Image: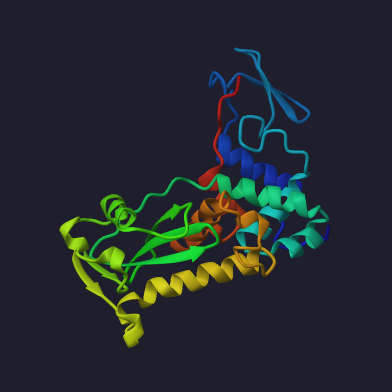
Amino acid sequence: MYQLKQIPSETQIKKYLRRILFGKNVFCPNCKSRAIIRYENRYRCRKCRIKFTLISHTWLKGMKLPYQKFWVILWCWTTQIPVKQSVALCNLSEEAVRRWYDLFRSHLPINSEILERIVQLDEAYFKRISLLMGKQQGTRKLAYDIFFKKSVDKTNAVNFLEQYVKPRSKLRTDGSMIYLNIHKWWPVRHQKDIHNKWEFELTSEIEGVFGNLKTFIRRMYHHATPEKYHHATPEKMPEIVREFCFRFSSPEMFGNPLNYLEKSLTLVPFD
């Protein structure tokens, strides 16, 4: 593995992790006591007598990678380095890189947006998957639902509005029949584009987001379409769409590995 200038030393990475998890002084993750004995790379609590390491009570528990290699793979993921490139850079197997990417994705914080004012809503279809996504116009706020079927119906659209769109918002969609008289099911002021009449202005932002999503999947995961990418199977698509939405809505979280870890890494008591 090459030593890149953007990768801190092992010592500095440990300092980052210690500050994120413990603040100024290490304490027992079990009983919170500060009566801690340190020996080599481990700690022992004098009060409850448990032994722990810097990361043993986090989702990084059991990590076998050196801290610098971990930082490199996290840097690759946060900066959207494709899997193939990460394999070559980190000298890890493709399976290992994909496993780490999946792990990072799974520890994104929970983010539930309520869209308001002007909301653009559209559907996208993949193999055996339907995606309904809304965008608050002029902002980076997104909300979505995934359905494990080939199409979206009116019930799905109404449920989406009930969950993610503030009443009395302006709703802008295409001319799909699933939105017909949608205002009778949820209080929105509905406007629509008729695409076969070359009307695209009202939904241009959300259609652009769908284009970015497909580019993200192809670029990040080896130029494969969602239908062919084995990590974008129906079971994986919710995770991938969630990652994309986080990257779109909260780009500051992916500026570097430290930003991501400050939001995602916490102490979890283990038995």
Residue 223 appears in the figure:
yes
The one nearer the camera, 113 or 134, is 134
Numbered disc total: 0
| Residue for point 56% across, 34% down | 22
Q: In which quarter of the image is the N terminus?
A: bottom right
| Residue for point 62% across, 30% down | 57
Residue 45 placement (x, y as % from top left): 64, 18
In the displayed structure, 138 sits above or below 246; it is below
Q: In which quarter of the image is the C terminus?
A: top right
| Picture quadrant where residue 7 is located | bottom right
Residue 9 appears in the figure:
no
State the scheme by which the image is colored.
Answer: rainbow
The one nearer the camera, 47 or 55, is 55
In the displayed structure, 64 sits above or below 129; it is above
| Residue for point 47% across, 59% down | 150
**Does 22 sit left or right of 204 as displayed?**
right
| Residue for point 52% across, 48% down | 108
Residue 263 placement (x, y as % from top left): 51, 47
Residue 194 placement (x, y as % from top left): 30, 80
Residue 14 placement (x, y as % from top left): 69, 42
**Does 75 sit left or right of 201 as displayed?**
right
In the displayed structure, 72 sits above or below 24; it is below
